[in-house]
Image (cartoon, grey):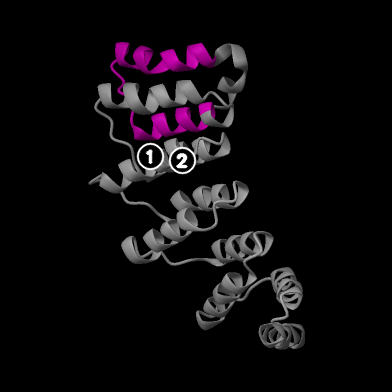
Amino acid sequence: MCYLKKNEEYYEALQIPEKMKLFGCKPDTLFYNALIHTLAKAGRVREAVDVFEVEMPSSGIFPDTSTFNSMITMFCHHGMDQEALNVLKKMESSQLCRPDIQSFSPLLKMCFRKGKTDVLLGNLLDEMVNKHHISFDLATYTLLIHGLCRANKCDWAYGFFKEMIDKDIAPRYYTCALLVDELKQKYNYVAADHIEGYMKQMKSS
């Protein structure tokens, strides 16, 4: 698909499915995923939406988790918040796949980028944990702690730090240092001392 990235060749790329059908080759989900990913990466939002909403259904091809995730990532990247949330809802109603941590990661980043760190962020986290039973990994905890610190919500971030430790997921040293600085600015020295004690253990291990 790399050769399709030149701007003048996008129209030709969108004709490939029809050409394949003429030769008796039916495009599959993997093909459409590659096409959507290429279009999305190049900022061809309308064309990617057409493939997702028109071409795939008309060809009898069902999207999988990768398809939905590419669409969510694209919409979030272009600031199309509601469209991204609509794709998530559509994914949740699918009988063939379910959201994973990669589905929510761009949505969480969107919340921090746009300052939506109250209701929307809380709802997304609730869905991840209680509805879809998604376990957070190091990258997700790092994203949450850094984002919440920047949003002046270090107490919430500290809660995620403690959750990481309880799950034996070791935070990065820089994440600890950032959280300590934020907590001290809020005069939460008890929490800051707890993290500094953990940082000393990190250095000695």
| Residue 91 seen from this side | yes
Q: Which residue is mark 2?
A: 72
What residue appears at the point 40 percent right and 22 percent down from the top-left corner?
Answer: 50
Which residue is at 62% across, 48% downward? 113
* Mark 2 crowd level (few <14, some 14–19, many ≥20, 10 Å Cα): many
Q: Quadrant of the C terminus?
A: bottom right
- In primary-sequence order, the first of circles 1 and 2 is 2
- Tell whether position 44 is magenta: no
> How many numbered marks have been drawn onto this rendered protein structure?
2
User: In this figure, which residue is indicated by the disc labeled 1?
Assistant: 87
Q: Can residue 101 be seen in this snapshot?
A: no
Give x and y (percent) for residue 139.
Answer: 58, 61
Secondary structure beneath disc 1?
A: helix
- In front: 9, or 114? 114
Q: Residue at x 49, y 12 (%)?
A: 12
* Image coords of residue 49 (percent x, y): 42, 26
Instruction: Report the span colored magenta.
Output: 10-39
Q: Position of residue 152 (x, y in %)?
A: 66, 64
Q: From this view, report whether residue 119 is shown above or below residue 135.
A: above
Query: Magenta: predominant secondary structure element?
Result: helix
Measured as percent of width and height from the top left, residue 7 is found at 61, 16
Examine the image and state in which quarter residue 146 appears: bottom right
